Amino acid sequence: MTDQDQIQALKAENTQLRTRFIQALARISEMKAWVLKSSTVKTSKNSSKPLSTDVGRKKQSLRPKSDKPVGVQFGHKGRILKMSDTPDVTEKIYPHFCNNCGLSLQGAAFELVERRQVIDIAPIVPITTEYQCFGVGCSCGHRQAGSFPEGVSNHVQYGKNIASASGNYSSKD
């Protein structure tokens, strides 16, 4: 086989491979179109997805439409926290030096500029109650012991206030 024959054979093979490649690309694009057309979008109706993830779901309010504007209505008096005239704790805050020149302000005459109050509740401190049962021997030979109050059934347990705050309390306990 001469070089010219070999070149002609390779050109023919190249043309044949290009034709097969183009046909394969056409089949792949047809398959992609078929997959996209036949695949179903998962929604809350046909899968276990939550309703909130549905695309295009219109959120409808159960409230009737109103002609009033959204938000606080005109003429509504706002409510704010009122300052207490008798705070439980007062902390006085004095500057120690001038932020401008750096001089000490010790011994200067200060005046009240602004007040702010923080309302909080006292921290909850647990109260541990220990029940001690005592026993005694009777003259008849019987040994008698005291009995714990109703609801005290373990060596250490939470009381009814903690149980009710955590939602684990029932009136049967």
Image: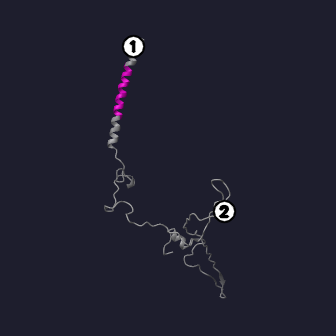
**Residue 138 percent across, percent down from the top left:** 65, 86
Farthest-out residue, front: 109
The answer to whether residue 27 is magenta is: yes
- Residue 108, percent across and down? 66, 62
> Measuring 32% from the left and 43% from the top, which residue is drawn there?
38
Q: Secondary structure at mark 2?
A: loop
Please name the residue that numbered disc 1 is placed on: 5
Residue type at tag 2: Ala
Report the Cα–Cα distance between label 2 and label 1: 109 Å
Which range of residues does the magenta coloring cover? 12-28
Q: Would residue 143 appear left or right of 120 to someone viewing this image?
A: right
Q: Residue at x 42, y 12 (%)?
A: 3
Per the image, label 1 sits on a secondary structure element best described as helix
Are there few (<14), some (14-19), or many (20+) residues within 10 Å of tag 2? few
Above or below — where is 96 with respect to 172? above
Please give the residue where the numbered disc 2 appears in the rendered image.
Answer: 108
Q: Which mark is residue 131?
A: none
In this rendered view, identify the residue nearer to me: 47 or 81: 81
On the rendered image, what quadrant is the N terminus found in? Answer: top left
Q: Which image quadrant is residue 76 in?
A: bottom left
Q: Position of residue 30 (x, y in %)?
A: 33, 35
Q: Main secondary structure of the magenta part?
A: helix
Whichever of labels 2 and 1 marks the residue nearer the N terminus, that label is 1
Mark 2 and mark 1 residues within 8 Å of each other at the beta carbon? no
The quarter holding residue 112 reads bottom right
Q: Residue, x 35% and y 38% (percent of image)?
A: 32
Q: Is residue 16 above or below residue 139?
A: above
Describe residue 172's horizontal placement relative to residue 154 as left or right.
left
> Is residue 24 magenta-colored?
yes
Q: Residues within 10 Å of mark 1 (few under 14, many from 20)?
A: few
